[in-house]
């Protein structure tokens, strides 16, 4: 079985702080990490490899040359191969142009059974790239996968809903997007870290892909970020005093005024 995992290098948004004077984001010193949902996607692929023979896992990313570091982290977790789609022409892409590039990279690999992606990246936060890749490769997709098992030739997944889950049977090839409830990602192992640095990461530029050059990167993106700004800080908290039932009453009135309840 051939498994591809889409992985994205993202700034650790837990580390991003707001400069109180300028109101802008402080990005200096913010580490780049493997997107958390993508770590769950990779872990699920690794679990399949642990339990079945003849499984190969390839991780693929579109990003700048620095994304090589994250790919080696994936190799050190247990992936067999890594592909970096990197070219200035891919820069500034929105989700449509991003998925065009990644789908072209996956099509070049060809011959895959399962494609895993994360549900969402913690920087762009759209959750659009996985489903768009499936559309462009013309294969079925299941998003929000919280449980996965192989039964004979079938794959049975639970798709997370707000108030429960759907049980879905799928056949390959299929694209699945992972949520954090799916598993607990493993750590890198020392021997695999050493191997990861000896591994040859494939770097593919626009000329290596069978992609329409007018359909990738910033210029091809149907959406453009027009303005970005830091949200207003929340107002000060209010301390209510008095008897418990009076306070409860005030809270209910306040919440109703704000249309929260
Ligand atoms: C300079 C710049 C300009 C931008 N301009 C725009 C713009 O004008 N309009 C706009 O809408 N967006 C813009 N973006 C954001 C861009 O659309 C997103 O970074 C990108 O499309 C991925 O979307 P996302 O982060 O929401 O991923 P999601 O859709 O939330 O990611 C879901 C999953 O898809 C996979 N995935 C996502 N991205 C990658 C990747 N690069 N490589 C491999 N797998 C991936 C991962 O498995 C991930 O978990 C810009 C970004 C940059 C850096």
Image (tube, rainbow, N blue to C red):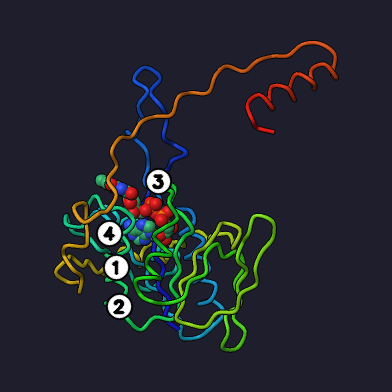
Mark before the other along the chain sequence, 2 or 1: 1
Q: Farthest residue to the left: give it.
A: 207
**Label 1 residue SS:** strand
Q: Disc 3 marks which residue?
A: 123
Q: Farthest residue to the bottom: give it.
A: 152
Q: Residues within 10 Å of mark 1 (few under 14, many from 20)?
A: many
Q: Is residue 123 left or right of residue 208?
A: right
Q: Is residue 215 above or below residue 18?
A: below
- Return the mark for residue 109: 2
On whether ligand 1 comes within 8 Å of the CB at mark 4, the answer is yes
**Label 4 residue SS:** helix
Q: Is residue 241 above or below residue 208?
A: above
Mark 3 vs mark 1: in front = 3
Residue 107 location (% of width, % of height) = 30, 76
Q: Mark 2–mark 1 contact, CB under 8 Å? A: yes
Q: Farthest residue to the top: give it.
A: 242
Q: Is residue 148 left or right of residue 245?
A: left
The front one of 212 and 67 is: 212
The residue positioned 34% from the left and 65% from the top of the image is: 196
Mark before the other along the chain sequence, 1 or 4: 1
Residue 93 location (% of width, % of height) = 26, 53
Q: Mark 2–mark 4 contact, CB under 8 Å? A: no
Mark 2 vs mark 4: in front = 4
Q: Disc 1 marks which residue?
A: 83
Mark before the other along the chain sequence, 2 or 4: 4
Name the quadrant containing residue 191. Answer: bottom left
């Amino acid at each position: 079985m051939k498994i591809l995992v889409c992985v994205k290098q993202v700034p650790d948004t837990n580390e991003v702080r707001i400069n109180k004077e300028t109101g802008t984001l402080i990005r200096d010193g913010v580490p780049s990490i493997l997107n958390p949902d993508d770590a769950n996607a990779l872990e699920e692929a690794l679990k399949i490899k642990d339990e079945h023979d003849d499984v190969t896992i390839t991780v693929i990313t579109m990003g700048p040359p620095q994304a090589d570091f994250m790919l080696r982290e994936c190799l050190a977790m247990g992936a067999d191969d890594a592909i970096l789609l990197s070219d200035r022409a891919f820069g500034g892409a929105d989700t449509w142009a991003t998925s065009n590039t990644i789908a072209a990279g996956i099509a070049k690999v060809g011959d895959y059974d399962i494609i895993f992606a994360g549900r969402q990246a913690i920087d762009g936060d759209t959750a659009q790239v996985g489903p768009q890749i499936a559309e462009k490769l013309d294969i079925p997709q299941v998003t929000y996968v919280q449980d996965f098992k192989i039964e004979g030739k079938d794959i049975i997944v639970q798709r997370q809903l707000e108030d429960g889950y759907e049980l879905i049977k799928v056949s390959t090839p299929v694209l699945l997007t992972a949520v954090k409830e799916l598993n607990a990602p493993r750590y890198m192992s020392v021997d695999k870290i050493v191997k990861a640095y000896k591994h040859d990461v494939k770097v593919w530029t626009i000329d290596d892909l069978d992609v329409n050059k007018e359909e990738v990167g910033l210029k091809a993106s149907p959406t453009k970020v027009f303005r970005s700004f830091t949200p207003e800080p929340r107002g000060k908290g209010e301390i209510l005093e008095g008897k418990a039932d009076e306070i409860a009453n005030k809270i209910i009135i306040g919440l109703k005024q704000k249309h929260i309840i």
